Image (cartoon, helix red, strand yellow):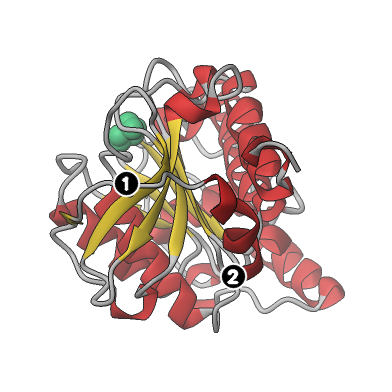
Amino acid sequence: MSSILDVKVMQDYIRMCHDGVGLGWHERNGGNLTYRMREEEADQCRPYFKSEPGPWVELGVQAENLKGEYLIATGSGKFLRNVELAPQDNLCIVELNAAGSAYRIVWGLENGGRPTSELPTHVMNHSVRKRVTDGENRVIYHAHPPYVVALTYVLPLKAEVFTRMLWKSETECCVVFPGGVGVVPWMVPGGSDIARATCALMETYDAAVWAFHGLFVSGPDFDTAFGLMHTIEKASQIASIALAAGGGNTPKQLITDENLRDIGREFGVALNEEILNYREAGTPYC
Ligand code: 2HA
Ligand code: ZN
């Protein structure tokens, strides 16, 4: 291999950035993506690492179970639409220290810069998802998909309400995210408070809506994480159109709770029962 860009994990990562841009989820510097590398993937990339890694930088959060791991990350202030053109200027690989509390850049951001402003949230989410999925989850992806954000202006900011709306807006949603999606109220982005709030939800859910902002998803691989973002946004688009057409009221006909239970049985997935039984008077889909 003559370039780090010949390594499959780098190609897959870059393709995901490209696909998110194509769907309109990454205006300007919006959104960010991190991938927790497998040992063999880090080994494949190591020959291309900088001869002098960058200085250690404190994260402001600590993730002990990520000590010594390598993450591929988008750069702070970088535009995802430029990733494909110049990955070495817009992406980086960071190494975490032995305490899981600081990082240093070992590859990329050749013209300077820092990893994504949401790195504390990503690192803490990786830590939680690694623990609750026994190491399976490796991708944390944040985007600004417009329909799910639009719905945060009109529906109560509750996991139960958003999940019911999504499950009932596209038949296969409840198979894709049977546990539901969490909702974080509006918070200042980029800091450790929003990181902690998102992490609390990531204990249970593999997706968290950020009110008036965007969506965070996690997954074991690029396809699954991207597919989750895509499915949630598609269902949100359908819900937005149906709600608008109905003047904001619950659509006249819906997938019923019994229908959802039937799908769960047929596909062998356990739907979150609390969400199935949730009722909120006067609220669409509830
Ligand atoms: O990276 O989307 O939330 C830019 C953002 C911050
Ligand atoms: Zn954002």
| Quarter of the rendering containing residue 43 | bottom right
Front-most of residues 250 and 227: 227
Residue 39 image label: 2
How far across and how far down the image is residue 71, in percent? 45, 55
* Rendered view: 168 above or below 77: below
How far across and how far down the image is residue 127, in percent? 37, 72
Q: Name the kind of residue labelled 2 in the image.
A: Glu
- Callout 2: 10 Å neighbours few (<14), some, many (20+)? few
* Rendered view: 236 above or below 133: above
> Which residue lies at the image location 29% right of the left edge and 79% below the top edge?
64
State which tag comes first along the sequence, 2 or 1: 2
Quarter of the image that includes the N terminus? top right
Mark 2 CB near ligand 1 (8 Å cut): no
| Quarter of the rendering containing residue 67 | bottom left
> Which residue lies at the image location 21% right of the left edge and 40% below the top edge?
189
**Given the current orientation, which residue lies at the most extreme front position?**
51
How far across and how far down the image is residue 18, in percent? 63, 26
Residue under pointer 1: 156
Q: Say whether residue 219 is visible.
A: yes
Q: Quadrant of ligand 1?
A: top left
* Rendered view: 88 above or below 172: above
